Image (cartoon, helix red, strand yellow):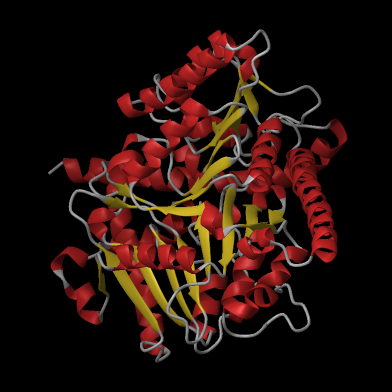
Amino acid sequence: MMAAPMSWRRLVYSVYKPVLTGVFTRISDRFFRTRDRRRGSSVLLLAPLLAETDLSPLPVFRSPGSTGAQGTDGLHARFCWMAEHVPAFRVPGSHIHILNSPDQFYQSMKARIKTAKKRVVMASLYLGTGPLERDLVDCMQEALERSQEEGDNPDLQVSVLLDYTRGSRGETNSRTMLLPLLQRYGRQVRVSLYHTPDLRGLLRLLVPQRFNETIGVQHIKVYLFDDDLIISGANLSDSYFTNRQDRYVLLENCGEVADFFSDLVGAVGDVSLQLKPDNSVDMIDGMVHPYRGNRDDFSTSARRHIMTAVNTARTRQHVSESRRSEREGVEGEGEDRGKEDTWVFPLIQMKPLGIQVDEQITQRLLTDADAGATVFLTSGYFNLTRAYMSLVLKAGADYRILTASPEVNGFFGAKGIAGEIPSAYIHIARQFYTKVSQLGQQERVHLYEYHRAQWTFHAKGLWYYLRGQVWPCLTLIGSPNFGYRSVHRDLEAQIAIVTENQELQAQLQEEQEMLYQRSTEVSSSTFQQPDRHVKLWVKLITPLIKNFF
């Protein structure tokens, strides 16, 4: 009988310790802000932990006549407004391939690492420590060894970007997995560990491992090999290579897109901690430290550095497009132009650094989804921001939203409070379903749950169908989950693919069907099932979970 009180004390400690710390954070932040401005930095300056107000939808980008015509002939006219804000890369749709399984994702990476000649760029939340991950590191070592054998000045460069907190968890971790590469091939290998500026001062001292990852992480997933790259939501860990369903798109021989993401990962790496061969870390000279330096100075400097890379890519792409147009004007409509039937728009979200392009473009897409259009939207953690939810409930388009059933949630069966996170998502889904029903939107907005024995579900993104079209013409694919963390706390990146290529459209349709065929539609009876009971205390802490998980 004594176990219950102890359990409650642990619960209160684990849940409300960060919250109480956050309250102190705000007091401390106000008290020391003036002194911090005078002296440049303060170890006592703490980051805000309590949730920011999730405001109503941002003003969306608008261009005259940008709604465009229906059908594939008007696709570029309909979506070209994105090119006003991000680079727009025109590529052959035949160079883009949808990967459908974790093993296909894993084997594609291994094969391309082994044959890379000039660059391997890997950005992920973390690198696991099991045999499959060791094989991946061995592939990098094999490629580096081969490059050294080919000459005195090897060309191959390997750059890895991970999150500092997640990559440092435990004695054996992502850092120790990569140290042998740094120690043996130091001139060719770079390992960068991004540290959020919001984890600092007493907050950094008080919040333990695992919980400190809730403050904010590097969440971009980009895997690049010469001019090929994979954009995904999957991390570099064994479950993502075996039985954790995600989405993955391979772009082959797309040099301009690869250059953009190589520069982006490099820019984020520049403002990150650099791993050294002795497992210590330091910053590049001249860069503001993320938790020892002034918080505003770090964010301003990092934003400027990253946006310089983005804007340089835009300028480079505009010059390339101008030259291509001039050639086509002289030579006529060339064969290459006919093959370049697809546009790739890279979208990034880094709100702790003041960058919110993905959020604004996603809101615009949801706003413009009018009656007759259909949007299939999926997230492994169904937790739409209020702004996104408002747009879904007010839009004219039909929505088919897919999320994880409790048993395929990544936290299912976890120890301690983490084991109750699937219950919190049940509560969130029920609140959303109730809202849809209250508004009489059941015929337009449908909610589905993914089921698969011995698997977990981590897929995210959307497929966009114009009125009367049976195949999607646009997809969003990458790391964002459409939730609070993705918008407000973490570094995220995805791509919008707009395509007229029917083979690529068919691949996207097959991918969507593969996921949704393993789902069942949610109804009011779903929440009456015994395994959908949510404890009162879980309901009470769900607002915290929505903002941190």
Q: Is residue 47 visible?
A: no
In the rendered image, residue 396, in percent from the top left (x then y), is placed at: 52, 87
Q: Quadrant of the N terminus?
A: top left
In the rendered image, residue 363, in percent from the top left (x then y), is placed at: 61, 71
User: At 63% from the left edge and 43% from the top edge, which residue is drawn?
Assistant: 258
Q: Is residue 109 visible?
A: yes
Residues 249 and 74: in front is 74
Residues 287 and 372: in front is 372
User: At 47% from the left edge and 82% from the top edge, which residue is drawn?
Assistant: 469
Quarter of the image where one finds residue 235 = top left
User: At 74% from the left edge and 77% from the top edge, which residue is drawn?
Assistant: 62
Residues 156 and 261: in front is 156
In the rendered image, residue 266, in percent from the top left (x then y), is placed at: 68, 34
Q: Along the horizontal axis of the image, is 280 left or right of 177?
A: right
Say above or below: 216 vs 513: above
Number of marks drawn: 0
Say above or below: 381 vs 401: above
Quarter of the image where one finds residue 78 = bottom right
Q: Along the horizontal axis of the image, is 449 left or right of 318?
A: left
Q: Along the horizontal axis of the image, is 89 left or right of 177?
A: right
